[in-house]
Amino acid sequence: MFKLFTGLQWKSFFRSSTFGKSLGIKILMGFFGVMMLFYLAAAGGGMYFILKKIFPNQSPMWTISQYFIYWILIELLLRYFMQKLPVMDIKPFLTTPVKKSAIAHYILGRSGVSIYNLLALFFFVPFAIVLLFHGYPALNVLLWIVAVFAIVLCVNYINLLINKNDKALITIGSLIVIGYALDYFQVFDVKVFFAPMFHALYAYPLAALVPVGFAALIYYINYKYLRTKIYLDATLKPKTVKANTSDMAWAKKFGEMGPFLQLDLKMIWRNKRTKSQVFISLLFVFYGLIFYTQDIYSDMIPMKVFLGVFMTGIFLSNFGQFIPAWDSSYYSMMMSQNIPLRKYLESKATLISVSVVVMFLLTIPYLYFGWEALAINFACALYNLGVNIPVILFFGSFNKKRIELDQSPFGNMQGTSATQFLIMLPVLIAPIVLFSIFYYAISFEAAIIVLSVLGVIGFALKNYLLNLVTEQYRKKKYGMIAGFKEKAS
């Protein structure tokens, strides 16, 4: 039965009307996927030597066991956003003598062999091979790999249970932040507390049965849950949607922009893909901790400019690069009305500007690492406000691919084209290059002033730049309408 289901899924994939479209994007993403696996394997093979160099008096196995708890939590966090739930069109099978248990096992089995589970193996298997070459006991290492894969499966099936649960997302994110803070400020050593538990998976081979047992238990829980949902009546039953009484009426205070802001805010809050951008933006406030807490990056000032542009402009990049594709389902209707296009674009710019200001305020605690960090983030925020907002709106006029807002937010290439790759050059690379030129040629202060002045000039010319962008949208109007009507694009 598993072979039959797999064959049907492959036929559905290759016979899909959308298979031939965006083939270049699929090939490109496949290439990046292969490169990622290659880099993971290389990192896994070299991890033994890296840990030996950093911690010469400590076993690499003990060191990696210390960070296992963070790896599990981060894996859960990433999967929450990136891993799509295993989907199968089961309606045709519900009227046939195919067992519901077979369908449930197929869905779970297909999830178990997903690419996300292979990522961990491409890292840990090369690491284990190096351990064997350095005289570590073969039985201990092999059963340790079994235990690691069982943990990966546990994470996989836990994600199926908690996915799309906002409370679970907040809990996982809070645990990571609290754990890191306790470690960093030496309040409680989380790594040392959990290290013996995970090191026991190597030191005592029979301990591998514990994660294997947990994986089997979580699989069974998922199976029982799916088994109760595979009914034709359940698929036919209309969804009961809880009414949301929040109509964002306060947005009307912004005058002619009010209705557009109100529409955007409702769209962001009520749809999976847009709401996920808000959570991602808030989480990436902590991205700078990866670099500011490492001595190796202390002298890499241009890298901190990248962090400043990225952290203060994460929503600008993630949300702005798909303007106006977010409105693709009703864009043609909007363009047929007596709606001022200038106000429409100005509302987008206002929304993104607010996000930049909020993200900068959230990065103020980086002052702990020195005034340079605050100065960089402030200059980058100004640059985002004055330069990157008009740039990203301009590139939005080249978006012609439709986005279905009710689709899975991650692993979803809807709306993606070459524009999304090209836009990163002026948004991320240009400020780094400008800063580097003035930083190495004159001084740090001069480079900060250049970015800040460019941002202020751009903000002063806001009306002029938005007028140019509006004219560009008028020129591309009918091409965008035609593109957004193609649902299979």
Image (cartoon, rainbow, N blue to C red):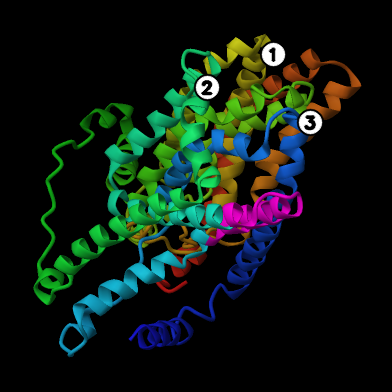
State the image coordinates of residue 323 (x, y, percent, origin top left): 48, 49
Within-10-Å neighbours for mark 3: few <14, some 14–19, many 20+: some
Q: CA distance from mark 1 to mark 3?
A: 17 Å
Mark nearest the camera among 3 and 2 is 2
Type of residue at label 1?
Glu
Type of residue at label 2?
Phe
Within-10-Å neighbours for mark 1: few <14, some 14–19, many 20+: some
State the image coordinates of residue 172 (x, y, percent, origin top left): 38, 36
Instruction: Please tell me the numbered disc located at residue 434.
Output: 3
Q: CA distance from mark 1 to mark 2?
A: 14 Å
State the image coordinates of residue 474 (x, y, percent, origin top left): 51, 55
Q: How many marks?
A: 3
Q: Is residue 176 left or right of residue 140?
A: left
Q: Residue furthest right?
A: 441
* Label 3: element kind: helix
Which comes sooner in the sequence, label 1 or label 3?
1
Q: Is residue 12 above or below residue 271?
A: below
Q: Is residue 48 left or right of residue 66?
A: right
Q: Is residue 167 above or below residue 182?
A: below
Instruction: Please tell me the numbered disc located at residue 360.
Output: 2
Residue highlighted by disc 1 = 372
